[in-house]
Amino acid sequence: MVNGRKAMIFAAGIGSRLRPITDSIPKALVPVGGVPMLQRILLQLKSFGFDDVTINIHHFGQLIIDFLLANNNFGLDIHISDEREELLDTGGGILKAKAFLEGDEPFLVHNVDILSNINLHEVYRQHVESKADATLLVSDRNTTRKLLFDKDMRLHGWLNHTTGETKPEGFVPDATQHRELAFEGIHVISPNLFNKMGKGTQWQGKFSIIPFYLSVCQSLNLQGYELKDITWFDIGKPETLQQANEYFNFKSL
């Protein structure tokens, strides 16, 4: 793989759904199959050529710093984006880390509690070849909140089936034109999106990245990358953590 790629791992979450485990350690250091989830993500990123990694911290942030130091950063160039004073959500977290992420090449963003066997090289390659401003990993899972894409997998809007709410303002879903898919916590972003955030915009301080995406999807090329035939765990809650533990313990035999 070609080295030099940048990535960001969201590791600042409190992990409230995993209590009491996260009463004493950050979610990022919760073991899965005996290995902290952060370590699993770092080694996966490294295997796909992502060697410049930014990690945001908040809950028990010093424990993450100590863990990285004890493991010599796993041979990666790691930057810490410190949110211990204020948790900034996904969009605000990316914006705060701008100095580490901006440049000429896209960067990948990965939730620390997503474990999968997806080919991140292929995701990154498709993002570059499509000349997208952002590429979001999505799937056809059961949820009431869906992102809507056209036949070319370009993002057009969002629909909450429970309330009927849509975004952006004025967007009208069309079942004959739009596919409903759910975001899965991994995306690739081109640095030009920083031009739409920060000073002079509403997108500063604490904000979520999905509402931001929906605010710009009519004018920019935001693409979906659909997950198919992939082993995938969102381990932010006890039942899925147990499933992942069983899977990775089995795989390690």
Image (cartoon, rainbow, N blue to C red):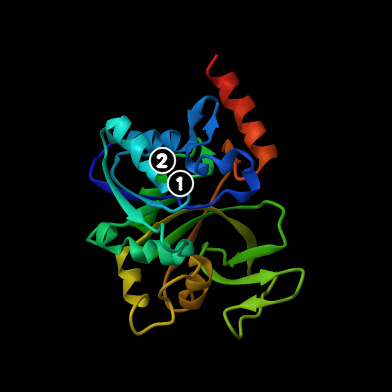
Q: Residues within 10 Å of mark 1 (few under 14, many from 20)?
A: many
Which numbered circle lies on residue 60?
1
Answer yes or no: is residue 176 visible.
no
| Amino acid at circle 1 | Phe
Residue drawn at x 45%, y 64% is 88
Which secondary structure, mark 1? Answer: loop
Answer yes or no: is residue 163 visible.
yes
Residue 27 rendering spot, x and y as whole percentages:
52, 43
Q: Which residue is mark 2?
A: 63
Would residue 175 appear left or right of 167 to someone viewing this image? right
Pick the front one: 32 or 16: 16
Q: Residue furthest top?
A: 253
Residue drawn at x 37%, y 75% is 197
Q: Quadrant of residue 75?
A: top left
Say if 176 sits above or below 245 in the image.
Answer: below
Residue 228 rendering spot, x and y as whole percentages:
58, 43
Say if 152 sits above or below 227 in the image.
Answer: below
Q: Quadrant of residue 232?
A: top right
Real-space Cα separation, disc 2 to disc 1, in angstroms: 6 Å
